[in-house]
Amino acid sequence: MSQKAFQDYYPDHLSYCYGCGRLNEHGLRIKSYWDGDQTVCTFTPATYHTAVPGYVYGGLIASLIDCHSTGSAAAAAYRAEGRAMDSEPPRRFLTAALSVNYLRPTPIKEPLELRSTIREIKGRKVVVVTDLMVDGVVCAQGEVVAVQFPEDMLR
Amino acid sequence: MSQKAFQDYYPDHLSYCYGCGRLNEHGLRIKSYWDGDQTVCTFTPATYHTAVPGYVYGGLIASLIDCHSTGSAAAAAYRAEGRAMDSEPPRRFLTAALSVNYLRPTPIKEPLELRSTIREIKGRKVVVVTDLMVDGVVCAQGEVVAVQFPEDMLR
């Protein structure tokens, strides 16, 4: 995709997150984008991201939902203010609460697709709900309550 | 600790989980033990398991709670049946639902201690609640609903 990902707008000093930091060479380095009113992220697990043989590790699923959701929360906050993601002041989000329902074992042989909806934006809080799919079948559903960083943590 | 960890009882073919499989050389390889009626696990994050610099990645916290809880669920099931963990038939658990509340940023400089209580054992379901602490301060709390594997997945 030639479009810039949400995570590509994060300033360098906030780009070392294990899940989404583009500068963390050991990390997952996920990329999230708008698709209409939803946000999407695709990720292909490594063979060692397994739980039971043949299926994706649930902790990886939680990690992907976590970082895709905080990125989506930031993107939604900018969009709600009618601003580009590289405009000032910066908006970045932490996870206050994460929940995941594992509906069925997630096969490891295909790319995972995360597709999220912004359920609520209220003050400094954004709630993001996510379907995690393999080949169009929803295998897990997540909800993240994301809260805006204190301004002094952004500098 | 000379005591055998819960995960050391898992059969080889179920020991490749990224979080707790002793045979997954890329994984976290956590170890869980009884301490009275609670279960405990300590884990020292790598420097790259970061979120914001100086703090532990929330997805790692979710992963640790996930695997420590399914291990604790198995141990609790054996204990409830008055059997050793290497006796037949085997008891192993999958995560049906995971929730984590991040109470405060978790400093990365210390080992993390997970301390869990078995809230409920009912049929094939075990509910495990966990405090994740650094230096005695609770930084995150988790709840896992773990469900016993279908018997045919254990063979």
Image (spheres, coloured by chain):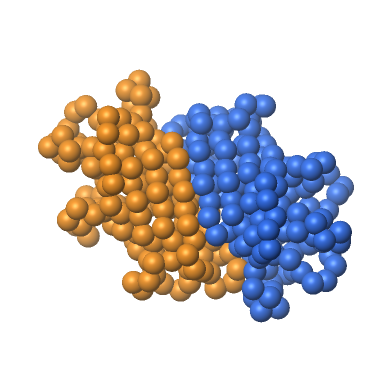
Chain colours: A blue, B orange
- The picture places residue B6, in percent across and down from the top left corner, at 27, 46
Q: Determine whether, in the image, residue A84 is placed left or right of residue B128.
A: right
The residue depicted at 33 percent of the width and 31 percent of the height is B148
Q: Is residue B51 above or below residue A70?
A: below
The residue depicted at 36 percent of the width and 33 percent of the height is B147
* Number of dots carrying numbers: 0
Q: Residue furthest front?
A: A122
Which residue is at the front of the view, B69 or B142?
A: B142
Q: Determine whether, in the image, residue B88 is placed left or right of residue B155.
A: left
Query: Is residue B15 at all visible to an observer of this figure?
Result: no
- The picture places residue A88, in percent across and down from the top left corner, at 83, 71
Q: Determine whether, in the image, residue B88 is placed left or right of residue A74.
A: left
The residue depicted at 63 percent of the width and 44 percent of the height is A129
Q: Is residue B120 above or below residue B36?
A: above
Q: Quadrant of the N terminus of chain B?
A: bottom left
Which image quadrant is residue A13 in?
bottom right
- The picture places residue A107, in percent across and down from the top left corner, at 55, 29
Q: Quadrant of the C terminus of chain B?
A: top left
Which residue is at the front of the view, A36 or A127?
A: A127
The residue depicted at 23 percent of the width and 37 percent of the height is B77
Which residue is at the front of the view, B25 or B144?
A: B144
Q: Residue furthest top?
A: B152
- The picture places residue B24, in percent across and down from the top left corner, at 43, 44
Query: Is residue B121 at all visible to an observer of this figure?
Result: yes
